[in-house]
Image (cartoon, helix red, strand yellow):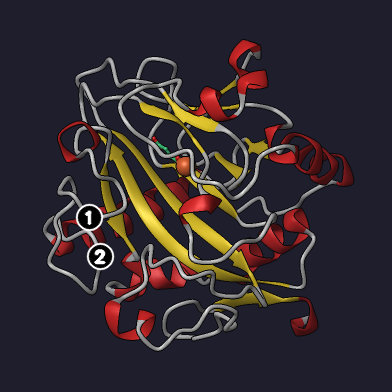
Amino acid sequence: MNNTLSATQIASYRKNGFLILDDFLNPEEVLQWKNSIDKAVSDRQGQKFPHSKIKTGESDGINKDAEYFGKVFDQIVNLWMTDDAVKALMFDKRIGKMATDLAQVDGIRIWHDQSLIKQPWGNPTAWHLDTPFWSFDHREAMSIWVALEDVTLQNGCLYFMPESNQVTGFIEPGIGANMGDIFATYPKYRSKEPVASVIKAGSCSFHNGLTIHAAGVNMTPYTRKAMTCAYMPDGSVFNGKKNVLPDDYFKTLKIGDVLNNEKQNPLIYHKNWD
Ligand SMILES: O=C(O)CCC(=O)C(=O)O
Ligand SMILES: [Fe+2]
């Protein structure tokens, strides 16, 4: 694993709201990740969350347009909770330190991981923000997106709007079938050129959850498999949104409570650990 980050890379992430890292995993690690994640996904038999019977592609209260959204990607959330091999990959302190250094926070918790498989002929992922869906408001919440297969302009690579992380906020512009709906909320970006993240299997990107991003249509008869993990800065507090929280935990929370339940949001790295 190439987990070193230069000062230039960190500065680029801070400015642009995303960072592309080629050859993050070596070929052996790519195989290990792919095999572990394939198995973990297959064991879930389409079950989207560990805590509910909802299947990927069904309306889950987060994405309401199930007919369209179900064909954007297969989304299996929190594989770390149901598979020990994936748990070991997601709890890797080296990745936790990378996220912590990029976000310039004291420590990082897993918000949720998710496998994102764009099936052959899968719909595009419309321009959106991540953080406004989540149960805490933090400007440094972010994700890693690891390509498990070569990701191209043809099969649905990610696209980022540089520097949009500096102007967006926590209002939820939504994500639906229309690629450009977000530009009603952020009109300045309607005329900006995005950066396409064309990366090989084993390469990755990090993006701030407030960076405007999207993914293309899959115009190939093959899958586009990615493993992602969303990160919450340690110390983040509950904002009242349910998002991926299970009912029984959600019911115990009051707005302002620190989200530090290790069973739901484990700390994977803290500066004090060094
Ligand atoms: O993989 C995709 O199509 C979209 C991924 C995404 O939006 C994310 O990881 O935040
Ligand atoms: Fe996203």
- Residue 171 x, y percent position in the rendering: 55, 47
Mark 2, residues whose alpha carbon is within 10 Å: few (<14), some, or many (≥20)?
A: many
| In-image side of 78 versus 268 (left or right) | left
**Depth check: 173 or 108 in front?**
173
In the image, residue 205 sits, relative to residue 29, either above or below, namely above
| In-image side of 207 versus 240 (left or right) | right
- Residue 204 x, y percent position in the rendering: 55, 41
Give the residue at x 63% y 10%. Answer: 191
Mark 1, residues whose alpha carbon is within 10 Å: few (<14), some, or many (≥20)?
A: some
Query: Given this view, does label 1 or label 2 mark the residue nearer the observer?
Result: 1
CB of mark 2 near ligand 1 (< 8 Å)? no
The three-letter amino acid code for the residue at tag 1 is Asp
| In-image side of 9 versus 188 (left or right) | right
Could you tell me if the residues under marks 1 and 2 are in contact, i.e. CB atoms within 8 Å? yes
Give the residue at x 46% y 53%. Answer: 133
**Depth check: 202 or 133 in front?**
133
Q: Earlier in the sequence, mark 1 or mark 2?
A: 2
Q: Secondary structure at mark 1?
A: loop
**Can see residue 198?**
no
**Can see residue 122?**
yes
In the image, residue 251 sits, relative to residue 183, either above or below, namely below
The three-letter amino acid code for the residue at tag 2 is Phe
CA separation, marks 1 and 2? 10 Å
User: Which residue position holds label 1?
Assistant: 60
Give the residue at x 45% y 20%. Answer: 180
Question: Could you tell me which quadrant the N terminus lies in?
Answer: bottom right
Q: Secondary structure at mark 2?
A: loop
- Residue 202 x, y percent position in the rendering: 49, 41
Question: Could you tell me which quadrant the C terminus lies in?
Answer: bottom right
User: Which residue position holds label 2?
Assistant: 49
- Residue 219 x, y percent position in the rendering: 28, 15
